[in-house]
Image: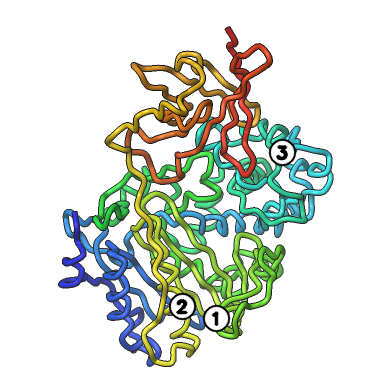
Amino acid sequence: MNHFKIFLLTICMTGTFINGQKTQPNLKGLDQEINNIIADYKGVGLSVAIVKDDKVIYSQGFGFRDLEKKLPVTVNTVFPIGSITKSFTSILIGSLQDENKLSVDSKPALYIPNLQFYDDRMNAMMTVGDLLSHKSGIGRADGSYILFPENRRIDLMKRLPYLKPGGEVKDSWIYSNLGYIILGTIAEQVSGETWENLIKNRVFKPLQMDHSSTTIEEMVKSDDYSLPYGVYKDSTEKILYQRPYNDQPGAAVNSTANDMVNWMRMWLNNGTFQQQKILSENYVKEAMSIKAIFNGRPPVTAEQNSYLFGYGYGWNVNMYRGHYKVHHGGAVSGFSSNAVLFPVEKIGIIVLSNQQNSDLPYTLTSMISNRMLGLDGQKPYAYTKEIYDIKKPEKTIKPIDQNKKPTFNLSDYTGKFTNLGYGTFEIVKEGDQLFVVFPAFKFRLEPMQYNAFVCKLINEIPQQMNPEFELNFTIDNEGKISDVVMYLQREGVRFEKVDQK
């Protein structure tokens, strides 16, 4: 369904300015500029809120939460916020530290029984703070819990001794969702409560985030929630929700612009909301400090807007045109979001959207930041648009290149393969095609050349990963297939064949 013309003609706006405040001069024409940018992105809907000096100065909904039924977005429409959730898990760690139940300077093994990492260096040096700031070295091992989920988060911890690190502990910065799964497990072990209950009791309730939740099942019980959308060949399509389970501590919060306003006020007010202390001022300052630099290079040009990129405890931190900026984005299937804080100026901006694979929220928060900081020169914001097509199953099957056809008969590639850091999958032959069957997904294996194959979608799945990873089979000295290397991390992950004939 191509709805570009719909938005050029009528873009639905709902919501209102809060507390009857008048529009500030630097927000003059903001509605129209947002509308123009939404139309350019072929966006469906979004919600925006701005905080200044502990007061809400702007809160507005745009477009549709349900495109087919033309249901409008409001300031109370619930959106999954993706990885902004990491700052919520950071709140849990901070509040537990404030109660002297843990320390960010202690080893994770102090709180999780029998916890071991890949090597002695990681065991000896890693701290809870390193997990918070992505300095653990664990890196991107998302395939472990996405393709091979466990019934309980703590059961994933048994895999850690077998997961080869992506970098050096303390001496590298590699974004790690698995690191936040470990943090969620630490919070559960220390408190004796589930991560979900901790978020509700320590964040949602005291911050009066009454429309927020931690599961899609809870979210859709609301009478005002958003559907997920993505763009494919210039057309907008409804796609599947992503349901974080093992990954809840890194990506599971669902919220509204109005609820996120209270969350921003707490961070900007040194951990206090309506005279109630949620976090200590010390932890807030530490969380919003640079603990790891992941791009310390100087600006390329004099006009470069941002430089000195770092990470705190659940927050990105950098200098933005001379202003200290604390921010985090989020992306789950069908949704993109961004939260931006300027602690010195006491400014907070939240943009929640129901568009997949898009930098729309980032464009909007940058535009609004320039307005709020008086950097826009009263001119429309100039930006470079980034939006990518959703992944869909291919309707045609590519014929095998006879010059590079598989070395063996397809049936020889079948069997079960295992890795202790991930799990076990099976390759099966159905008709004249090979399929790889994981505990959570099933893909078709398309021959590339000789003993190399690539995974292909066979049905619609949540847009939480690119499934087109390679499998390269290894041949032993007896001329048999002994294992397969799957490119799930920076380096290939080796799965041993467990049912050799």
Instruction: Indicate which disc, 2 or 1, sits on the residue closer to the N terminus.
Output: 2
Would you name the residue on which mark 3 appears?
A: 112
Residue 53 point in image, percent of width and height: 51, 83
Give the image location of residue 258, x and y in percent.
39, 68
Q: Amino acid at mark 1?
A: Lys
Looking at the picture, does residue 366 appear above or below residue 129? below
| Residue located beneath label 2 in the image | 51
The quadrant in which residue 103 appears is bottom right
Label 2 CA crowd tier, 10 Å (few <14, some 14–19, many 20+): many
Q: Nearer the viewer, residue 116 or 212?
A: 116
Q: Callout 3, which amino acid? A: Ile
Horizontal side, residue 170 vs residue 95: left or right: right
The residue lying at 71 percent from left, 54 percent from top is: 135
Left or right position of 431 against 209? left
**Tags 2 and 1 in contact by the CB under 8 Å rule?**
yes
Foreground: 347 or 413?
A: 413
Residue 346 disc label: 1
Q: On screen, 216 above or below 299? A: above
Dot 3 falls on a residue whose secondary structure is loop
Q: Is residue 176 above or below residue 426?
A: below
Instruction: Tell me which corner region of the image, top left, top right, bottom left or bottom right, holds residue 98.
Output: bottom right
Judge the density around disc 1: few (<14), some (14-19), many (≥20) Cα neighbours within 10 Å. Answer: some
Residue 451 location, x and y as percent?
Answer: 53, 26
Amino acid residing under circle 2: Val
Q: Earlier in the sequence, mark 3 or mark 1?
A: 3
Image quadrant where one finds the C terminus: top right
